[in-house]
Image (cartoon, coloured by chain):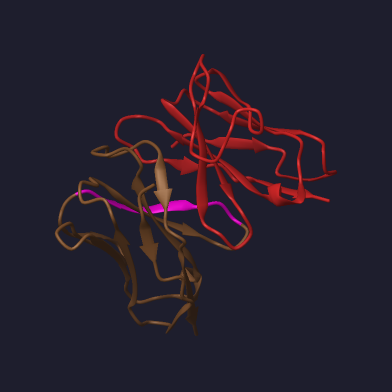
Chain colours: A brown, B red
Amino acid sequence: QKEVEQNSGPLSVPEGAIASLNCTYSDRVSQSFFWYRQYSGKSPELIMSIYSNGDKEDGRFTAQLNKASQYVSLLIRDSQPSDSATYLCAIPADRGSTLGRLYFGRGTQLTVWP
Amino acid sequence: SAVISQKPSRDICQRGTSLTIQCQVDSQVTMMFWYRQQPGQSLTLIATANQGSEATYESGFVIDKFPISRPNLTFSTLTVSNMSPEDSSIYLCSVEQGLNQPQHFGDGTRLSIL
């Protein structure tokens, strides 16, 4: 099974700061990468997907992908207490696929304090 | 995106019994998956539910323990058989609608075995 590694945290940042979440993966040919947010007691919710090297921005969220170094990160700017959740990194299980079965990392628990 | 309904939302069961979880989608989807999330853990893929044929199981999961049906493009069931306390988890249905859209999840079924 492919490895998807995340620091479990917890990561604690003050309101208004930038939260940086990191994920590394073992399969060099992975084509797509997903960030899900999971609030306590809720199911995961897709917040970002990224397929190409570089940055992808969506509102306060920026995903950064570096395929050569095999890591993908999620930056949350102007963090809010409502961003407090567990953030899960996921990659497709099937080599070379962009979708389909997913393998998830352990997740990073983020707390944003007022 | 498609609306995914899972039933039951939670249950408490006796060991040795079986429970069937239903996943209903309000539109036809290409792929349906079942995941398990044990307490404090990340998501583990159980199987891909294949329409009109046997499900494809991941390593460590077998049909006798987790029989899955998918009679059409909008519905699937997962049965947890001969339950033990180790089966206490959240079971999640997820779908891909096609058109290069990543998976999204139902609300999950919280299962406790006494």
Q: Residue furthest top?
A: B52
* Residue in the picture at 36% in, 55% down: A3
| Residue A109 within the magenta-colored segment of the rendering | no
Residues drawn in magenta: A42-51
Would you identify the image quadrant in which residue A80 lies?
bottom left
Give the camera-side residue of B64 and A70: B64
Q: Nearer the viewer, residue A103 or B65?
A: B65
Query: Residue B35 in the image: x percent, y percent?
Result: 54, 43
For image coordinates 26% across by 47% down, the residue present is A32
Residue A111 image position (x, y, % from top left)? 49, 77
Q: Is A56 positioned to the left or the right of B109 in the image?
A: left
Quarter of the figure with residue B21: top right
Residue A26 higher or lower than B102, as above or below: below
Is B66 placed left or right of A71 in the picture?
right
Q: Residue at x 33, y 78 (%)?
A: A18
Q: Is residue B96 visible?
A: yes
